Image (cartoon, rainbow, N blue to C red):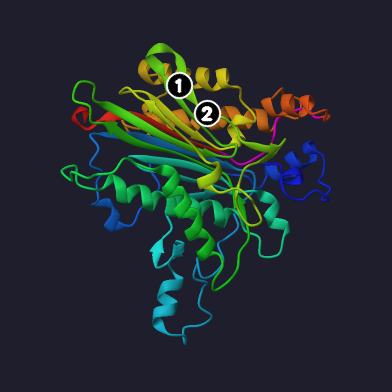
Amino acid sequence: MHSSTRLVANVRLAPPSTLRRCLASTSQTSTGKTTPVPSEAESRRSSSPYYFDTGFALFAKRPSRPFPPPFLSPPSGSFSEPLSTHDRSRDRRSYVNGEMIRGITNGDDAVLVGENFIGANDGVGAWATRPRGHAALWSRLVLHFWALEAEKNLSMSPETASMPEPDPVAYLQKAYEQTLLATSSPNEWHGTTTACGALLHHVDNISNPGPLLYVTNLGDSQVLVLRPKDHKIIYKTSEQWHWFDCPRQLGTNSPDTPKANAVMEKVELEVNDIVLAMSDGVVDNLWEHEVLKNVLDSIDKLESGGAGRERIGTPDGRMLYVAQELVKAARVIAEDPFAESPFMERAIEEGLAMEGGKLDDISVVAALCKRRTDE
């Protein structure tokens, strides 16, 4: 996200080409199949007959800031301190309300990857210039609490006669409220974030059962649903902006709330459809047709053996490879000061002089819809 226009209007930034050179040496990348969960959560399996085979890839334009106490226990000052404090200081994982914070931070982005819920939140980086500002904390906490609420619903027994229909907007509203509380006491931390998530459920209709995706969006991150067998995109979320480069966002001083502004839509899936959850680091650098082509090309390479087993690690690493290739493609444009990009096109439409890609945190979660009996 461009911090100059999203939050702070009077900050002068270096030209984009200069920023690219300065940030190139500090960028970070990471990949994985799923994001970590506490050991007690691993035993709570969703009651849905469908699940996601997943992979994620991340590129951060600069290293993520550590979370402040009490979310991250600082190293103890000496061995004379209580043993329990020193022992906890070795644990570098982040905690809130005594529980490990779900997901992974990527710059100011946050992603969460599970077998029935995926999400990509984009924290507004301009908060780094404000006292007690921490956008990455906000993006991660909102996603953490959102996933917990979704998990409660998905882990309910299928025999429960009154099992409610998923309500991702209500889950997000509660997550937003819990984040407000967590960042208000004992220390106050400011920030805002977009929110984008996809919850995999199913239709119980006996005559036409099948996977059903609940997609929720607030802001300018994006969910795309691809049907590889038909070589097409069957669904995409719509961006929500207050004005150019200032999306709807949850958090400090923002008028937006999930209850009032989040959009939820249901998408009927087929087994082997691919769901992508992406931050605007992808959307601002690749057009929709380029994303589709990149994913289809990756699948073709995997099926033909051209990707190489050593590049995907395991036979079930297909979505990891898809996510990696998409991040690579977006990064090429983001770091090219002369490339044509969707962000450049929008800027020109707004009467702004700009060329090249948009250097930003790039987060991609790729999820393949599977049926448990297909395992």
The quarter of the picture where residue 272 lies is top left
Dot 1, how many residues are within 10 Å of its Cα: few (below 14), some (14-19), or many (20+)? many
> Overall secondary structure of the magenta stretch?
loop
Query: Is 348 placed left or right of 252 in the picture?
Result: right
At mark 1, the secondary structure is helix
Q: Amino acid under label 2?
A: Leu
- Counting from the top left corner in percent of width and height, residue 124 is at 64, 48
Q: Amino acid under label 1?
A: Ser
- Counting from the top left corner in percent of width and height, residue 155 is at 26, 48
Q: Is residue 374 visible?
A: yes
Q: Quadrant of the C terminus?
A: top left
User: Which residue is under mark 1?
Assistant: 298
Query: Is 14 placed left or right of 67 in the picture?
Result: right
Q: Quadrant of the N terminus?
A: top right
Compared with 81, 35 (above or below) is above
| 1 and 2 marks in contact (CB < 8 Å) | yes
Query: Is 192 placed left or right of 84 in the picture?
Result: right
Which mark is drawn over residue 326? 2
Span of residues in magenta: 354-362
